[in-house]
Amino acid sequence: MTGTYSFKTLYEQIKSQKHDFWRTNVYGILATLLLLPIPMLIPLLIDEVLLEHPGKMTETISAFFGSSETWVYIAVILVMVLVLRFTAFFFNNQKTFYAIKITQKISYLLRHRILHHLERVSLSEYETLKSGGIASKTVQDVESVSGFAGQMVTTLLSALLMLAGIAAVMLWMNWVLALLVFMLNPLFLAFSRILGRKTGELLRRQHEAYELYHELLNETLELFIQVRASNQERSFFGLLQNRAKAIEKASLDYGYKASVAQNSSTLLTNTVVDIFRALGIAAVAYSDLSIGMMIAFLFYLSTLVQPIQQLMGLVISYQSTKPALERINTLLSLGQEPHYPHEKDPFKNVKTTSVALKEIGFAYKEGKTVLHNVSLKAEAGQKIALIGPSGSGKTTIAQIMVGFYPSHSGEILYGDMPIKQIGLPVVRENVALMLQQALFFNDTIRMNLTLSRARSDEEIYEALKAAQLETFVRQLEKGLETPIGKNGIRLSGGQRQRLAIARLILSDPKIVIFDEATSALDNATEFHLYETLAPFLEGRTTIIIAHRTTTIRQADHIYLIEEGRVKAEGSYDSLQERGLIKEDFDKP
Ligand SMILES: Nc1ncnc2c1ncn2[C@@H]1O[C@H](COP(=O)(O)OP(=O)(O)OP(=O)(O)O)[C@@H](O)[C@H]1O
């Protein structure tokens, strides 16, 4: 399911719901056919009853009911009209039900497609996204597109049929007037295209204003503490106020002009109806058109307004759906992670495995190489450490190991098997990357530990114990069900890191990569934590990225990374002898 979404895709999706599509149309057609004769029935009574020109209708009623009383004619026709109207009402409701079903299905399919695409979006493309934009695209724009689909399903066929039916009846009544009426139709549609283009552009601006507002609101609330600590509330909320004002202006522009467009089309159609009313009276005065027929003709003329306005509305919303589709396509055209087939499994039936990078070259942006021919290896069960100054490329190496940025040169091997034959989901299932800054859901301790996987309380407490957090959690009134707040705000920095470590233990990976994962702890706590973690890490390939000498001392082998290159490697003692280990790499 790749590629962009177009009107053709929309059409295919409507078509794929064949049964509901046909039900909508059959009910629509039935309702239209039932409503079609209504405008003619009562006016015919004028000619045949009031003006005493007996015709087919009165003859049939007399033959059927054996009475020529005026009230019988009126009552029979009234009952017929009411039966037709109520049955059409029932069919119209059925039509609406199936049309809404199609519309909602299209909304769902479209959201499903966007979410499916986002699920596998490449990290480099993800970094360009703003969450507010995604929210408005997946909510407002999807609604616009599915709303248009619904409008098309309900109105297109029945409006055309109604138009054709009324045209036929009017031609039969007075072909000159009818032809005049129908010659005006293209004018109506051209007029609505112009209106549609104008309002479509204004709607696009309104959506853009919403998107800018959502983006900033999301970020400001996300980083609220930072904003407050920097005493920048006034500036951020000031900017938000400006964006709220921009929404007001864009919505006023769109709301007003869309309503003017709507009123203009009503005005145009009403004006035309008025002109034809006058022409109808002229036709009675100067031709053989009867009064009853003229009234019927005028009723049809008023009825004609409905399908014409429906078609005009469709043309207008086609124009405003175009920008919504364009915006949705900006999401659908984001690059995705490559799909590597799962041909080999180096993690199967082993406790751990080796990991190696072979001549990795990588740039986030073209021309700005971050890694130059980096080669390194951790044998199965070995602990290696990556050290080096800030910005030298250590985190990038860790992220490349788990396939976050696949557009690199060189090879990544697990158990001597290339990552391209293992598949990214399998690698991530078995290799845990502990981030510098662990991220948490605004949910309970349990959910943040298990990430919704099924785990027993016993397993969870065991992991908490290994991460030295068991006593703390047991003392909490709600225990594992305690909510930790937005990004774990109700926990201390150290508790957050320990929670992340408990999560790691619970996921039982074959390889662990610590990217400065314990940097928020003080020296003694960190030392103690690695000591506690020792049984868990024992025999598991471990890669530690750290600044502190206490952390890297436990490594079997150390790589010194500088400016994206492996500058030196060896044991802690050998590097120290060469004067390559500094207590703090960021200090000159
Ligand atoms: N997502 C990104 N997009 C563009 N450039 C990036 C991105 N992430 C990192 N960089 C750049 O790549 C270089 C290496 O960064 P990296 O985070 O790998 O360094 P590091 O050695 O882990 O640093 P630190 O010790 O401070 O965490 C830096 O110049 C950084 O600015």
Image (cartoon, helix red, strand yellow):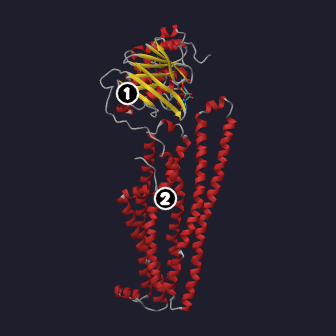
User: Can residue 429 be seen in this snapshot?
Assistant: yes
Residue indicated by mark 2: 148
- In this rendering, is residue 543 above or below 119? above
Residue 83 coordinates in the image, percent (x, y): 41, 73
In the rendered image, the quadrant that contains the C terminus is top right
> In the rendered structure, are the residues bearing label 1 and label 2 in contact, judged by CB atoms less than 8 Å apart?
no
Residue at 65%, 31% (x, y): give it.
228
Front of the two marks 1 and 2: 2
Q: Tag 1: residue type?
A: Arg
- Secondary structure of the residue carrying numbered label 1: loop
Residue 10 coordinates in the image, percent (x, y): 43, 56
Residue at 52%, 9% (x, y): give it.
576
Q: CA distance from mark 1 to mark 2?
A: 46 Å
Q: Is residue 409 left or right of residue 271?
A: left
Q: Earlier in the sequence, mark 1 or mark 2?
A: 2
Residue at 53%, 91% (x, y): give it.
287
User: Can residue 517 be seen in this snapshot?
Assistant: no
- In this rendering, is residue 255 above or below 218? below
Q: Is residue 414 left or right of residue 234?
A: left
Q: Tag 2: residue type?
A: Phe
- In this rendering, is residue 401 above or below 289? above
Circle 1 crowding by C-alpha within 10 Å: few under 14, some 14–19, many from 20: some
Residue indicated by mark 1: 455
Tag count: 2
Of the pair 175 and 576, the residue shown nearer to us: 576
Residue 469 coordinates in the image, percent (x, y): 47, 19
Of the pair 555 and 273, the residue shown nearer to us: 555
Residue 56 coordinates in the image, percent (x, y): 39, 88
Q: Quadrant of ligand 1?
A: top right
Of the pair 50 and 465, the residue shown nearer to us: 465
Of the pair 294 and 141, the residue shown nearer to us: 141
The quadrant where residue 16 appears = bottom left
